[in-house]
Image (spheres, rainbow, N blue to C red):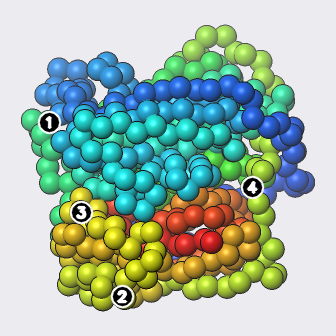
Amino acid sequence: MRLDRRALLAGALAGAGAAALGARARTHGGGALPGRPARGATGQVVERRLVAAERDAAVLGPGRPTTRVWTYADAGEPGFPLIRARVGDRLDVTLENRLPEHTALHWHGVRVPNGQDGVPFLTQAPVQPGESFRYSFELPDPGTFFVHPHCNESGQSGRGLAAVLVVDGDEPPDLRPDLDLVLAVKDWRLAPDGAFLPLDTKEGAGKAGTFGTVRGVNGRAGPAASLVPTGGDLRLRLLNLDPTRVLELGIEEGDAIVLAVDGQAVRPFPLDSWRLGPAMRLDLLVRAPSRAGDALRVVDYGAAEPWTVATLTAEGPDVGRGPFEAKTLYAARVPRPEVATAERLSFAFGSGSGSSTPSAATGGLPPDDPLARALLDSLCTRDTSLWAINETSWPTGPNAALPPPLATLEAGRSYLFELVNTTAHAHPIHLHGHSFEVLSSTRQPGLPRHLADTVLLLPRDRVEIAFVAAPGDWMLHCHVLEHLEYGMMGYLRVA
């Protein structure tokens, strides 16, 4: 596909025809995905220590002013550290906090036990400055995931606090890519001297969000560039780590097949373009150019002008792969809901009151609830509510009490949620601790049925998802970070 067609698409997206925003991929490939061989725990332990600290980083590039980022990376390492393990391994990660405020690690998209989910005040105590916290759990699913804090996200993630988690074990023997590349897209709000600009603004928070001033990939400004084996098969792991921006991804000068969404395998289909909201991921199989020196590009068409995410240039002799064909990952081993008998619940994502909404206004938790005395500090609340779920906003103000759950579910039962966007802005909705099935969308009629942990609601959209509830207290929120911080956040209790 050529840029002129993509440019026409980008122009169409900006107009009133946004209901068709982001052409969906073409039809599914036929047949079921192969089953992953049954293996339990591997007995292997992958140990890592993540030190959250402020460090100098050359975000703007060599010879430019450095930036005091917040990062888990050591000096000289990539901006977003990569943790790699195999499905069935035990991940044992110690978080050491050297920041001036408390933090935690949320394992985005990973079906962890509730106590490992990394939500301060709800699933664990905040990790205060100078403290450490050990996370330890078996990895139930292969795929592409990431790690981030869960209080003051716009401030902490906005300054760079994120890591990528790749869990291997989803590739059958006939799918062995010649190169596996991570492309984590994130903008930075930086002045020319490398200093941070305000990371959230009331004006942005009440609209689509506050956008960055410098676009970047893998922790550095500008597009990524990589040499790839000529004619080889490339697995691209694309992550949207931006607090705000919705990407519209496609490939120029090459062909691509979608392998997985949010880390979970799909029946492979050719990529036309795919919309990736904040926190969403996409795995592609891409054929490298057949002639050394030629290049293909990963392009974001969702911006006012198409922006190159990465340029991949062929190098060396042709590896001789033969015709480019669709190949499949192993099917996900995720509990599947009984859609026909699932209990239906509806959640409306809309505007908030614009005023302080202490949790006392909603009645609070019963006095005998273990969380009834939990008080949220100012890092986990804002001073006003601009957004809401079912007309209820996350509490505001200092020392607000933890609110009651949005709903109480039964563990092991199937649920069908209708997610309704009543606003003029897009909202990527994330449910912790689960991979749900995306069933339908009124504004995205070509959206294929797939598993996900984050689903994008277009303006005035209605999306249906279904899942089997796992026990615990699980956050449900928009992943435009200012939207969740200003009220579009709550939790589900599964007993």
x and y percentages locating residue 495 in the rendered image = 62, 72
Q: Secondary structure at mark 3?
A: loop
Mark 4 is surrounded, within 10 Å at the Cα level, by few (under 14), some (14 to 19) or many (20 or more) other residues, namely some
Mark 3 is surrounded, within 10 Å at the Cα level, by few (under 14), some (14 to 19) or many (20 or more) other residues, namely some
Labels 4 and 2: the sequence-earlier one = 4
- CA gap between label 4 and label 3 equals 35 Å
Residue 269 visible in the snapshot: no
- Which residue bears the numbered disc 4? 334
- Which residue bears the numbered disc 2? 362
Tell me, for residue 377, which label it has, or none. Answer: 3
Tell me, for residue 86, which label it has, or none. Answer: none
- Which residue bears the numbered disc 1? 194
Residue at image coords 80%, 43%: 330
State the image quarter where residue 409 is shown. bottom right
Q: Secondary structure at mark 2?
A: helix
Mark 1 is surrounded, within 10 Å at the Cα level, by few (under 14), some (14 to 19) or many (20 or more) other residues, namely some
- CA gap between label 2 and label 1 equals 43 Å
